[in-house]
Image (tube, rainbow, N blue to C red):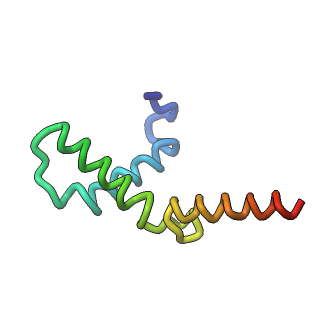
Amino acid sequence: MKRSYSKKGTPWDNACIESFHAIIKREWLNRYKIWDYQQAKRLIFEYIETFYNTIRIHGHCDYLSPDEYEKEYYANQIKQLNLN
């Protein structure tokens, strides 16, 4: 893990992960009573692998899920190779 390089009052490099933490808590973790570390780890893995990357749309991915965006990207790369 890398420490933040920003100074107090300028946390810009942490903005993305702070946003993700807020999303995962709001959309998933607040639904459960978490009893131990292993349960928390399982819930977070489940959220990321079964919803966040596969179903949930992302603005920076042209409002597709990351999986859909990646499939579209590679399909376009193959088309470009076939055209050359």
Would residue 66 be found to the left or right of residue 48 on screen? right
Q: Position of residue 37 (x, y in %)?
A: 18, 37
Name which residue lies at 42% across and 66% down: 56
Name which residue lies at 49% across and 33% down: 7
Of residues 25 and 13, the one nearer the viewer is: 25
Would residue 71 be found to the left or right of residue 14 on screen? right
Q: Position of residue 27 (x, y in %)?
A: 29, 63
Q: Position of residue 34 (x, y in %)?
A: 13, 47
Specify the quadrant of the image occupied by residue 41. Answer: top left
Specify the quadrant of the image occupied by residue 62. Answer: bottom right
Q: Position of residue 32 (x, y in %)?
A: 15, 56
Would residue 81 be found to the left or right of residue 6 on screen? right
Q: Residue furthest right?
A: 84
Name the quadrant of the C terminus: bottom right
Name the quadrant of the N terminus: top left
Q: Residue furthest front?
A: 82
For the image shown, how many numbered marks are present on the structure?
A: 0
Of residues 37 and 10, the one nearer the viewer is: 37
Q: Residue furthest bottom?
A: 63
Of residues 74 and 4, the one nearer the viewer is: 74
Would residue 35 be found to the left or right of residue 68 on screen? left
Of residues 4 and 54, the one nearer the viewer is: 54
